[in-house]
Image (cartoon, grey):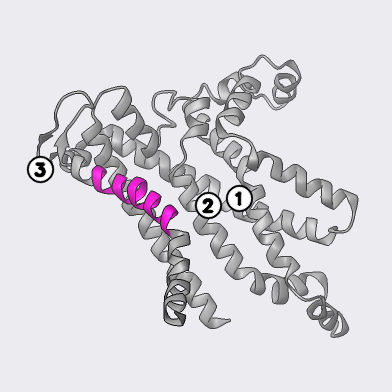
Amino acid sequence: MKKGRKFLSSIAPYGYVMPISLILLAFVVGSVVISLVFSFTKYNLLLDPEFIQFDNYKKMLTDPKMHLAVINTLKVMVLVVPLQVVLSVLFAILVASRKHSLIGKFAKAAIFIPVISSNAVVGTVWKTILNGRTPVLSDFFALFGVDTAMLLGSSTTAIVTVAMIMVWKGFGYYMVLNLSTLMSIPDSYYEAAKVDGGGRLQRFRYITLPLMKPAIIMDIFLSVVSSLQSFELIYTMTGGGPANSTTTMVLYAYNLTFKTGKAGYAMAVSNILFLIVLAVLVLQKGFMKREASEI
């Protein structure tokens, strides 16, 4: 009887995680396998797939739209990641320095509101604001010689505008991660540094920044993965235009599937993006493991 109870107690944890494991196996792993198989076919969601070996992958090498989508994806990453990480660290430090004040609590909540807002809603709101029909905003930007209607309407400014909105929406999430790290730093470290004559800059350089390094590394990799997978904001604000100047790899795969009927090719594009994201996650794991061993 005791052996039976012991056996049941040993397998009970696996029973708790079994439902979610089956869901992940069916919808995540299954989707990856299906995408891999259909990427070797000519498929349009309506007709039976036709096996064409590596033709879809070969086509990417000479597809100018694919090349532009890759460049746009990298542009978004380069514009978004540094700004999100830097702003999240700076605002986390500012909020932490006023954590007991009403202003600090209000700022933390206000900065986090865009994070919990729907990407589709945020994209629609900003598209409405930047369409030139908001007199106050139009007049403000006009002081600097900027036409708000052209921020999303020009191929040179559209991707920068979208990237800045992505920064505004997302950096609050990383700020909260950094804030939790700052709160875990003992006050005794700073008090000892003050006794030794350390100023604010020195305390930040030799105490705050080193102890925040693991969180900052996490911010960088999470932001990279998020920017590589950007879709909703771009889709609702520009639809990939003008002239495909904001079409990323995810949006290109979407257009291939639902607008041109090239689902097989779209899955090949998605698989390349999956490999890129997987490589980033492997690098993240290596960096975090190294940081943990150093600490």
- Magenta highlight: main SS: helix
Residue 77 location (% of width, % of height)? 48, 47
Q: For label 2, count other residues whose C-alpha is less than 10 Å away and answer few (under 14), some (14-19) or many (20+).
A: many
Q: For label 3, count other residues whose C-alpha is less than 10 Å away and answer few (under 14), some (14-19) or many (20+).
A: few
Q: Amino acid at mark 2?
A: Ser
Say which element carries label 2: helix
Residue 152 location (% of width, % of height)? 54, 25
* Magenta segment boundaries in residue numbering: 18-35
Residue 259 location (% of width, % of height)? 31, 22
Residue at which label 2 appears:
223
- Residue 42 sits above or below residue 187 on the image: above
The tag earlier along the polypeptide, 1 or 2, is 1
Q: Amino acid at mark 1?
A: Gln
Residue at which label 1 appears:
84
Say which element carries label 1: helix
Q: Are marks 1 and 2 in contact (CB under 8 Å)?
A: yes
Q: Residue at x 49, y 31 (%)?
A: 234
